[in-house]
Amino acid sequence: MLPTTYHRAQAEAETLDALATEGQEAVRELNRRIRSGAERVQRGEDPERVQSDTARAKAQLQGWTELQHTGYGKVIYLRGSDGRLVSWRIGQANISVSACGVVNRNAPVVSLLIHREPGDTVTMQAGGIANEYEVVAVALCDHVVGLDGGPLEPNFVRVVVDDAAAEDIDLIQDLKASLRRHFGATATVDVVPAPEAATAPEDPYWQVVLQAPVSGIYAEEAGLSGKFMTRTTENQEEALRTVRGIVAVQGVAGSGKTSVALGRLKYLANFRTGESADSSLPNPEDFDPGRMMGFVLSPSLRQYLKSTADDLHLTGMHIVDIQEYVQKLRIQRGVGVVSRFEFLPPVRRDIGAASGTMDWLRGADEAVAPLVAEVILPPLREMPPRPDDDDGRRIVPERWLELARATFGSRRFSEHVGRLEATLTAAGPGNRFRMEELAAQVDALFDVLDHAITDFERVQQRRLAIGERPALRTAMLGRLVASLRRLRLEEFYVEAVRTGKLASALSARHASEAAEALTALSERFAATPPKLAPGDLVTILSLYALASWGFARRINEISHVTDMADRMAVFIDEVQDFSEQETFLMAAAALPRYSAITTAGDIFQRLTRGAGTPDACFPLYPGARKSVSLTINKRQSKLLADLSLAVRQHVLGDAQSQAGLPGVPARVWLYSNADLFADELVRRILSVPEGASVAVVLPDMARAGAWYQRCEAELTRAGRQPTVSQKSDLVRLYHVHFTSAYEAKGLEFDVTLVPDLNAFDLSVPEGRAALYVATSRPRGALLLAASGEQLASGFGKLEEAGYVTVVPWEG
């Protein structure tokens, strides 16, 4: 160990003590400022200014509380060209503490430094002068405790120091205790070597290496500290710091796609503290996590994503699955209230490939729009009656008729309604949705009315009498409500199907593959009452999203046309498994002034039939888009990472993936009797430490349940806890999880066993993707096996390239 390791350890211990003092004083002062708000107003200060100051103080208090909870996770030690040593401490909280060298997470210097390694050089600007520095060391600091003034002293449970001058890293357990031992009997810091691997004989793919243990009084705190925001790569950092527009995060398994996507939302939420504010954000306080929404495929994914968001202190962020969101919108829009429908339950996750596309939605928009025009435009052309309120009753009938003809009967008014009709009834496919901003265009008649009033006043050479303008606007509101109340898109969609208008629109778009879906749809809608499948609801709600786009009024009588866009930021996880319309509908929740939509996914991990192409799903957001590709598998050991990349290349056909040259091929144990091979599975599981996370992964839950039945008795007798697990169960420790590739996707385990490769259907893309998901779950240990007399032909290229070899299992 280098002598400098001790000096750096001592510096971090002193920094923690100073940071604890600074934090406790800051929290007290911020609480005082928050409590003093009412007194300041009583003293005559501007209430709006006091409210703004209080909101900022609350945001800073949240930042300081987060800093006390998470501390900092990385220290970059630099040496300048003049020999001067400086250090930067980076955490996930957006709070700077200059006295301690802690920089706020959103500071530009963080992006410059966070991915640097020992030996790198970096140029930094100071006072307009460029200075060159060398990175002499990097320290990773894990699991801080005691910064909040509680019973524990400020401390790091673990510090890892990587020095450019050393061959190996130094791992320090319990920073303060190590320093006390240094000043006592020992002469060095307590450096703990990495734990040795538990290795099955002659199997380099079975390397069970657990993280260094965390125990005792620090065990609970250790599980609460997120690390991602202090471990980002240069490519990941680029995605995080994109403030506006759509960011698509793509990447291989294990590259941290979900963390990057959530990290972008964390970066935006950090602006609330007011530090390193982006000049393009007029209201940084808007980015409260409570105004953000994350979307997942299923309820089992929701809890997992919520725990990840909580680790990033995105407290209050809404996480919903697509079925829950669709039902929420259905209730809000009153689908099934005005008209009676039978709602069919979802049978399986498979999506109708044709009926879930954006082409289908464009066809539906084209077919429904003329029907809408026939119903909602007549109320706009009618001469409105005099309002029955105080303003209206003060106007004599003759005067009201004069006012109505001059405004509602004006050329301006009729031309606007005429343009709206022309848009809705235009023939043939167009580049723009016909019903986009429909309600907002009706609402624009208020501006037309104001212009017509101005024209009338100019002709009359006098202003309207008191109460006349409000009466006209009340009449306009009545016409708007009367018109939009009739906008029941579920009824128009059913009519478009029954009358063949949808079929004609799709035919004009050359959507020949839609014939089968149209036949099924026609049969459902011919019933009494019509039967709505989940996919039908998505189409109907997508039409509502178009029609209500930009309509800001909140009127109870027409709440079904209220704009859906009410979220400052939206995150869509596993986007490749949603239909195009589902992605469109979820994205429509994002406010267009920021267009802060982040998607995470990988087309080669698509497990859902009929899912669409995400690139086509954002026509309402025409601004800048960024795609970030993550190519480094940070989850797995190099041997396993090369194997999973080889599966991606040779089985899934990803030409962009180039796996490293195979060293030792992975063994695939070939067996004929599954009940007997279950004994080998149990033996392998019992050979790993009980603290290891273990998953047995099959193509589906039925097969997972069958293998659970084979292994349950022996594992239970040995004190292990076998369970058939869905996504929310898979984060539980000290269990042996039997699960499917679908449920395991997005998670990682110390040990993964895939007991039947031949059960994966490699003839379809979803089956090949499931295999890739299964083989890319383990961090260090993987067992592959297959039933039958030979490995399925789909594995041929993988075997020929030398990545796997078949070995008969003889029990």
Image (tube, rainbow, N blue to C red):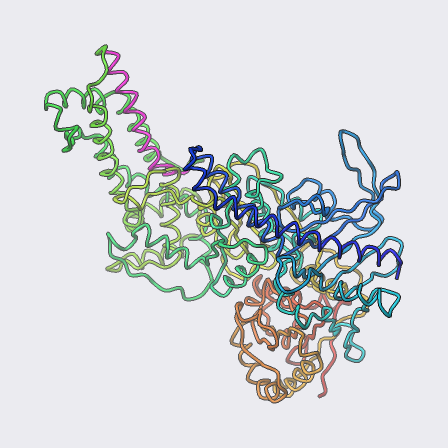
Task: Name which quarter of the figure residue 148 lies in.
Answer: bottom right
**Side (left or right) of 229 relative to 179:** left
Vertically, is 12 above or below 753?
A: above
- The residue closer to the viewer here, 350 or 237, is 237
Give the overall secondary structure of the magenta segment.
Answer: helix
Q: Position of residue 688 (x, y in %)?
A: 70, 79
The residue drawn where x is 25% and y is 54% is 337
Magenta segment: 433-459
- The residue closer to the viewer here, 221 or 139, is 221
- The residue closer to the viewer here, 459 or 113, is 113
Q: Position of residue 535 (x, y in %)?
A: 40, 56
Quadrant containing the N terminus is: bottom right
Vertically, is 570 above or below 449?
A: below
Q: Position of residue 462 (x, y in %)?
A: 22, 12
Count the labels in the image.
Answer: 0
Q: Position of residue 431 (x, y in %)?
A: 45, 35
The residue drawn where x is 22% and y is 31% is 474
Residue 261 is inside the magenta segment: no
Residue 440 is inside the magenta segment: yes
**Side (left or right) of 387 relative to 257:** left
Vertically, is 350 above or below 568?
A: below
Task: Name which quarter of the figure residue 759 lies in.
Answer: bottom right
Quadrant containing the C terminus is: bottom right
Residue at far left of view:
397
**Side (left or right) of 142 relative to 662:** left
